[in-house]
Image (cartoon, rainbow, N blue to C red):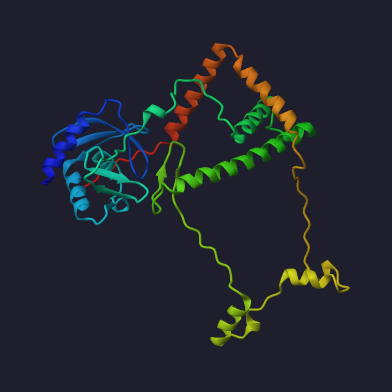
Amino acid sequence: MPFSVSWHTLLEHLDELPADATLITPLSHSRIHITDIQEHRVVVQFDESNEKRPLQRGQFETLYHQIQTAHDGFNLDRLPPDADPYPAVLSVHPRFEIDEDAGVIAETDGPTTTQLADTAHEPDTDDDRTEPDGLDIYSDGLLLIDALERHDVTDLPDLETATLVNLYTLLSDVQRDANDFRQEVADVLLSRLHHDRPVAGQYGSVQRTSRRNRSLKDDEDVLSMLEAEGIDRERVMSVDRQKVDEALEVTTLTESDVYEIDESEYVRKAEVDNDVKESRLQGLKDRLATSEETEVEELQQEIEALEDRIDDLTSFRAGTEVQR
């Protein structure tokens, strides 16, 4: 089938999309929507930055032929920089589909899915914010915010000891909760990132990296292989701390005889009074629930203004256009 037929089929399906239809790009997961459909190009706009970018027919044709000649689909990692929107738009065609798990876009004869965002299950941003069930970091974070609002933490030495203990306990809990939650988020993100390609969000960007860990094999195996290469085992033998500790128990030597000891003192959380935390947390929730409507509206306006400022400072605006 010539590309011209597929191109006009694509344009027809793009024309049928609702005006508010949102597409998700497969690599950076940016949200885009169609603003103009012309004979030789399609213009898209990025929701986060409001940047408009023309996608040329020639680039779609190049991608089309690469898909035709690729075995088991065209690898999305081979896309040029800033070409992420092309496969997202092409997926609207009924014969082309993106498989994000495999990292490819392929032509198929069966029913296909598109990169259209499922807005039916997305939360309405105009609704009141709700508490996420079972998320410890939300509760501990709310308690920490309350403590920071009630005390002047710019001069810690002036605070009472009990206040410092409360702050330290809450900071420790939030840190633990954040680390656990961060790992859960990272586990999901890992399946969506491809080969060190940075993925940008409103507040920053992440990328997939690899870590190489080493651990020695069995001691005798390692020593035997090194000796076979002419390396004397004495050159690689070292003192084993566990064996030294065992030896200290049956000798008259003291710990300081064989160890350089450097002692330091630090604060460690001993226990947490969860009942007090729950009581205080419920009080905060009740206070928020009974707040005057005008106060809630003012708070929401302040939050929205802050989010706009953060967006202006952190949004990435790319000005490059893909050329064949």
Q: Residue at x 69, y 35 (%)?
A: 170
Q: Nearer the viewer, residue 302 or 234?
A: 234
Res. 246 image quadrant: bottom right
The answer to whether 142 appears left or right of 26 in the picture is right
User: Where does residue 212 sit, x and y in percent of width and height?
Assistant: 51, 62
Q: Is residue 146 above or below residue 115?
A: above
The answer to whether 274 appears left or right of 290 in the picture is right
User: Where does residue 255 sit, x and y in percent of width and height?
Assistant: 83, 67
Q: Residue furthest front?
A: 110
Q: Is residue 308 above or below residue 8?
A: above
Res. 156 image quadrant: top right
The answer to whether 55 appears left or right of 263 in the picture is left
Q: Residue at x 67, y 26 (%)?
A: 281
User: Where does residue 303 sit, x and y in percent of width and height?
Assistant: 51, 24
Res. 213 image quadrant: bottom right
Q: Is residue 36 above or below residue 228?
A: above
